[in-house]
Image (cartoon, helix red, strand yellow):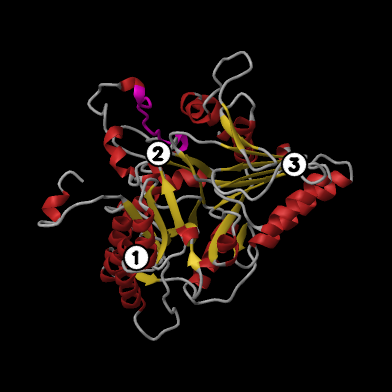
Amino acid sequence: AAHLELLFPGMEILDHHAFRVTRNEDLEVEADTDENLLQALERELMRRRFGPPVRLEVDEHIRPQVLDLLIRELDINEDEVFKLSAPLDLTGLNQIADIGKAGEYSELRFPSFRTKTHPDLADEGPGKGADVFAAIRRRDILLHHPYDSFATSVQAFLEQAAADPDVLAIKQTLYRTSGDSPIVDALIDAAEAGKQVLVLVEIKARFDEHANISWARKLEQAGCHVVYGLIGLKTHCKLSLVVRREGVSLRRYSHIGTGNYNPKTARLYEDLGLLTCDNEIGADLSDLFNRLSGYAHPTKFGRLLTAPNALRAGLIELVGKQKERAEAGLPARIRIKVNSIVDEDLIDALYAASQAGVPVEVWVRGICALRPGVEGMSENIKVRSVLGRFLEHSRAFVFGLDDEAQVWIGSADLMHRNLDRRVETLVRLVEPKQRRAISALFDLAMDPRTTAWDLAGDGTWTRSEYAEDGEPLADMQSTLISGRAEWWSRRA
């Protein structure tokens, strides 16, 4: 602002105001058009830069005449105008986050944290490394990122599959990945080694379209069979399937996760994943990949719940069973961990369960349309949100108590888009100690001695930070970092 006269020479600067425009980023691509899908999407990406404005942010002291001019020229209505006292572009504050990287002001930063290799995937000897396939054959492996290293688990699984001469085929979904993705490199290596590689790339992943188009072309050039999923649906599930020759038979190894195959965000996002060679899961994933690549009709699955066909109905049925148990005087409980919950049918089912006496615990990071603690409707529902150095991103569902509980993990939030317009997958955990491990996570998050945000029936959030005696409450993520021995023992 101090040098506006250089931008407008010969003009008198009477006043100046900051404003920022947000444009509609939605893409409209006719999936059934005869045109090349990648070319159609690239054309829409060019148009997106000139999409219609959907929000105008302005300095709270802006002159009315200038604001009227902006509203008229941008063709927006007053409901889309937001007057702010804070700086409009907070990205400039990123420089503050860099303070202390050289060692100074260490008290203002989180203590350093390094991910650790899951004990089941530890090196088998000096210079030998870990045999991921042998580890999975011994037992299913429940991963919890970022506490468990992504590089020595999921990434190592795919890299070993690419290099193993006994691996015949790899099938993989990609929703978001990093710019220099070792996952993509492993898939390319596998294809160039003569393996059958099928990659389902979701090229309409919001804000990652350019990168995913580039990956799709690179994978195709390497000989991978690249597909783009079902018409009208985004493929959001996180799946990997490896087919390996062992003696005279074939064995299928699977990974089902809650987070993206992105090594960079895996260090910042909290996510869960399952590595398994269970025959039923392998058959389920084979059928699902056949469906997604256009070679099969919808089918029923053994250990999966999938959207958009069965996930909502399946979850409502599980909620209903807990309601029936409570009505019969039997122990019952429902625990849900998601990013967002807005689906009316599921919320109504949870209200009905609460009214029947079922304790319901909802652990949510973002949008929550459910209202807990409302008399006559949701007295038995508790909603908490945990915010910390890692983004809580996993989705988990527990129906029942103790060893009788059904436990599911997967990619789906309880939103219309996830349940109706996306391909999502939940997998049921069967190992008792893994189910107890998920329950232990809920115990920690819902513990009144843990720092969290609690939702009231009027929609307000209150942060619980100190105990009644003034002592600070425990930070859940710090507890998981420091108390790993107990956590490992629950999954052993």
Image coords of residue 425 (percent x, y): 56, 58
Figure quadrant of residue 51: bottom left
Q: Could you say whether the residue bearing mark 3 is in a helix, strand or loop?
A: loop
Q: Amino acid at mark 2?
A: Ser
CA–CA distance in space, label 1 to label 2 = 27 Å
Kindly tell me whether residue 166 is visible in this rendering: no
Residue holding disc 3:
333
Mark 1–mark 2 CB contact (< 8 Å):
no
Q: Nearer the viewer, mark 1 or mark 3?
A: 3
Front position in the image: 255 or 479: 479
Q: Residue furthest toward the top?
A: 469
CA–CA distance in space, label 1 to label 3 = 46 Å
Please provide the residue range marked out in magenta: 108-120
Residue sitting at 54 percent across and 23 percent down? 474
Q: How many marks?
A: 3
Main secondary structure found in the magenta portion = loop
Residue holding disc 2:
149
Mark 1–mark 3 CB contact (< 8 Å):
no
Q: Amino acid at mark 1?
A: Lys
Front position in the image: 446 or 43: 43
Image coords of residue 247 (percent x, y): 45, 58
Residue sitting at 54 percent across and 59 percent down? 282
Residue holding disc 1:
195
Q: Relative to 46, is 320 on the left or the right? A: right
